[in-house]
Amino acid sequence: MSVLQNKSVAVLLAMYNGEKYILEQLQSLLDQTYHISKVFIGDDGSTDNSFELVDKFIIENNLSGHWFLIRNEKNLGHAGNFINLCKYVQEDYVFFCDQDDIWMNDKVERMVAVMEENSAINLLYADVINFRRIKGKNIYSSDYSNDGKVEKLPFSYTNYFFKGGGCGTCIRGGFISQMVQYWTKGWEHDMFFWACAILTDSGYKFNHPVIYRRLHECNASIKDKKTLEKRRRQVDQTVKRPDSLIKLVKDNNIKDKDKLEFIKGYKKSLLRRQRALTKRNLLILLPLFFGGSQYYLKGVKGLLLDAYLIIFKEYKG
């Protein structure tokens, strides 16, 4: 533990109208067995009492000078809020934090220890235990790994898309500073940093739960009604990503043919999707049914959703 204590840790917390659960999350940060050097909380224009509650929590717990509450001048969105907080990072290790989860008190200690044992890891994500609070009682899921193994996830078309969550990740501060330049607007922060890690062969999985992830109707990761217009906007933003990935690959002298072929195919599929959704033309989308579903986060389901929206314009799921 003495060696670990020399490593600095920053927590980046994105907040928006989180008054209902934010204090419970903050207390779980305060209760960590490993000292958190700094906490940066980005308030994205909350209209409830979130800002005041957090400000009071910081003062009452004598955290000023280590915990920083930042009010964004304009709403940046969930991912933009996190990316904005990245500019403050100078610590050895960085944790992303949602406003409504509860961290197990040894989360930081466990994950930092794993990364200290393996310098090849730039991004480590761990399991989470989902829960819902129903009638005052917490109902926990049992769908998680707990054998303590640490495994490298090599690049593949399947592994490119992040299957974990930002709430369960630990990232080296130097890696964040190096990679954040490749981010493009609309790219979810966890998906983005995982893409960087998988392309640089430094993404790992820790089979151990580290947080209790609260599920409710306000989760940022739970999508609302899907429409053709929203899908178009999403693809319009996503289509910029392959060019960013190409720059990342060139800057880091990555020669792997599979990675280069994936990025090339990814770009072609996005351009085809963009045309099909804009023109509402299924024939343009058709070739992807014969070799293109691997470029979708949801695989065949994502491709079928494109087709459905082209025909019906709306999907309530």
Image: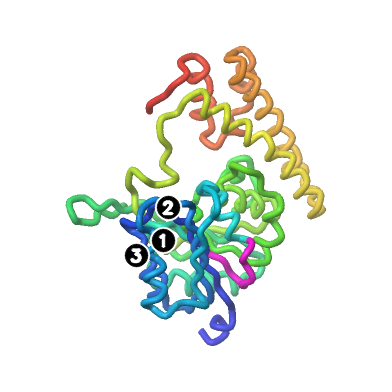
**Alpha carbon distance from label 1 to label 2:** 7 Å
Give the mark toward the camera: 1 or 3: 1
Mark 3, Cα crowd under 10 Å, few <14 / some 14-19 / many 20+, is some
The secondary structure type at the circle numbered 1 is helix
Residue type of the residue flagged with mark 2: Ser
Instruction: Give the quarter of the figure containing the C terminus.
Output: top left
Asked whether 120 or 168 is in front, the reply is 168
Q: Which residues are magenta?
A: 87-95
In this view, the residue farthest toward the bottom is 2
The kind of residue tagged 1 is Phe
Mark 1 crowd level (few <14, some 14–19, many ≥20, 10 Å Cα): many
**N-terminal-most mark, 1 or 2:** 2
Which of the labelled discs sits on residue 23, or is there none? 3
Residue 97 % position (x, y): 47, 60
Residue 46 image label: 2
Residue at which label 1 appears: 51
Q: Residue at x 62, y 70 (%)?
A: 118
**Residue drawn at 64 percent across, 62 percent down:** 87
* Callout 1–callout 2 Cβ contact below 8 Å: yes
Rendering colour mode? rainbow
Q: Position of residue 42 (x, y in %)?
A: 51, 59
* Marks 1,3: beta carbons within 8 A: no
**Direction from residue 192 to residue 217 in the image, left or right:** left
Assess whether residue 90 is covered by the magenta stretch.
yes
Q: Up-down: is 138 above or below 188?
A: below
Q: Is residue 71 left or right of residue 25?
A: right
